[in-house]
Image (cartoon, rainbow, N blue to C red):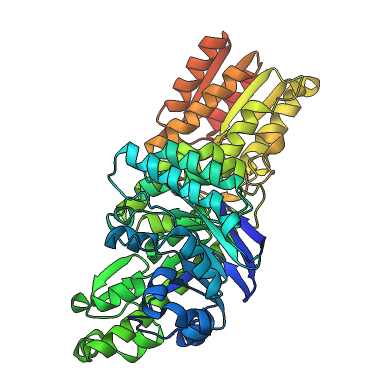
Amino acid sequence: MSFEIRDRDLLARIGRIRTKSGVFETPALLPVINPAVQPIPPKKIKELFNCKALITNAYIIRKHFADKAVHKGIHKLLDFDGVLMTDSGAYQILVYGDVEVSPEEIVSYQEGINTDIATILDVPTGWEVTREYAQQTVKETLKRAKKLSKIKTRDDIVWVGPVQGGNHLDLVAKSAKEMGKLPFEIHALGSPTPVMEQYLFDTLVNMVLTAKMNLPLDRPLHLFGAGHPLMFALAVALGCDLFDSAAYAIYAREDRYMTEYGTVKLNRLAYFPCSCPICTRNDPENLRETSKNERQKLLAQHNLYVCFSEIRRVKQAIVEGRLWEYLEMKAHGHPSLLQALKRLKKYEDYLERSSPVTKRSGLFFFSSVGLTRPEIVRHRKRLLESYSPPKEAKTLLLLPQTTTKPFHKSVEQRRLWKEIEGRVSERVGRIHICTYAAPFGVVPAEIDEVYPLSQYESASPFDVETIDYVAEQVENYIVETNYDRVILLEKSEVWKGKIVAACKKACRKRKLSLTVIKSRRSWSKNAFNKILKAVQ
Ligand SMILES: [Zn+2]
């Protein structure tokens, strides 16, 4: 197997996985095929959706077809010539209590049916279990994982090493670290059903990022049981590369219609908010009157159209470097997603370290939720850890952001600078202009063209958290640098006195002199003259 990464944004990547039955691109949604009850035949899924990889369940295949599947091979049995992944059926064994199948048998059976990507028989942790039980699932899964190399006889099958631990994060970390040491090519994280059903996306953030931080990053990560388009963008942004969806078929059976923002019962729809072939040819009323069997097929198709188009939107967002913007848009489709996005604050350092530094596009800043994004965290860190103002700079002249970017090329700053040069001539190097701006905080004039300090859009009024953030950055900047004095121009309407308060606090701490020039409109003639007087 090879996994080649072509594009990245946040922790998301667009990659290509090569297996013995072909190549497919990630992030990928693998529709679950249940040969016992399958609304759309695998071959048709390939034709309709250009779908190159499917997932099925080795345990169910074994139960229904036993040796027939070994003789025919899984590809012929399912009539699908793309990439086939098999789950071990650990979940079913857990639920139905079948102890007749041993971990060794499931390994050999998957080799026997000639699957492309196989999963060891792990022990799912599940939900609301004691710590002791969770610990036991981690231990037992690891034990089975270590045994794999002794049981397997083929080298052309890709093996998946599942990470367990549920919502016991220290156990997830341990499980991921140990699994990562074993020669698996793909890892998987079991997402307990309640996490998806009850939209516990903030829990999902904790689980996925804990696993990611402890797994080798060059191996793809499969998120088990996450088949709803509502959360693809979030899961991909967290670094999940593969998904399986049984939901498209299960929902169809229950007359549930997927949208990229949630699921609706068919009988509640007056119109179809979708333009897939099914929704274009039908309306909700005539679909309700179609026979149950036919309706199930059509709904399953629509559900898959929605899933695949969401995956494409997420990929396009990665290519454009706008995945964060896309996440924020999605987050306003469900409160739990917004909560999950806020949870990322806890992981902002890791997110920053793992995200690409340059991008093809500028940033849209909507609200304080965006303060967690890597570009903003990166600027903050750089300013504090590796930036120093010009050596001769003694006076910090702190100006409010202008509409024009870069700030030092705005009419206001250029005019001011020209006047200052005229008045103080050879002492001009002593004055250092910095702009305070949302969302970046303090932007020194000489670096304000560096990406992304000029390549963003924001609009005032800013929310309280954003104003507080900028004020905090101003305070930290003054405390950490070595000026003799600070001159601040405050635009009180926008900054609510918070920047003045921050400067006062910092200057008191550093025993610096502070001159505050207040102006309702930031560049009134009066304010302008006061600045010129102050710098002399
Ligand atoms: Zn549709």
Number of marks in the rendered image? 0
Q: Is residue 77 toward the left or the right of residue 484 in the image?
A: left
Compared to residue 353, the image places residue 183 above or below, namely below
**Residue 283: quadrant of the picture:** bottom left
List x then y, in percent, for residue 213: 54, 42
Looking at the image, which residue is at 35% across and 56% down?
332
Compared to residue 296, the image places residue 136 above or below, namely above
The front one of 519 and 505 is: 505
The front one of 353 and 409 is: 353
Q: Quadrant of the C terminus?
A: top right
Looking at the image, which residue is at 61% across and 47% down?
216
List x then y, in percent, for residue 473: 53, 28
Q: Quadrant of the N terminus?
A: bottom right
List x then y, in percent, for residue 282: 30, 90
Q: Can residue 365 be spotted in the picture?
A: no
Compared to residue 383, the image places residue 88 above or below, namely below
Residue furthest to the top: 511
Q: Is residue 344 toward the left or the right of residue 254 in the image?
A: right
Q: Is residue 297 toward the left or the right of residue 490 in the image?
A: left
The front one of 325 and 40 is: 40
Residue furthest to the right: 426
Looking at the image, which residue is at 49% across and 27% down?
472
Compared to residue 385, the image places residue 312 above or below, namely below
Q: Can residue 292 be spotted in the picture?
A: yes
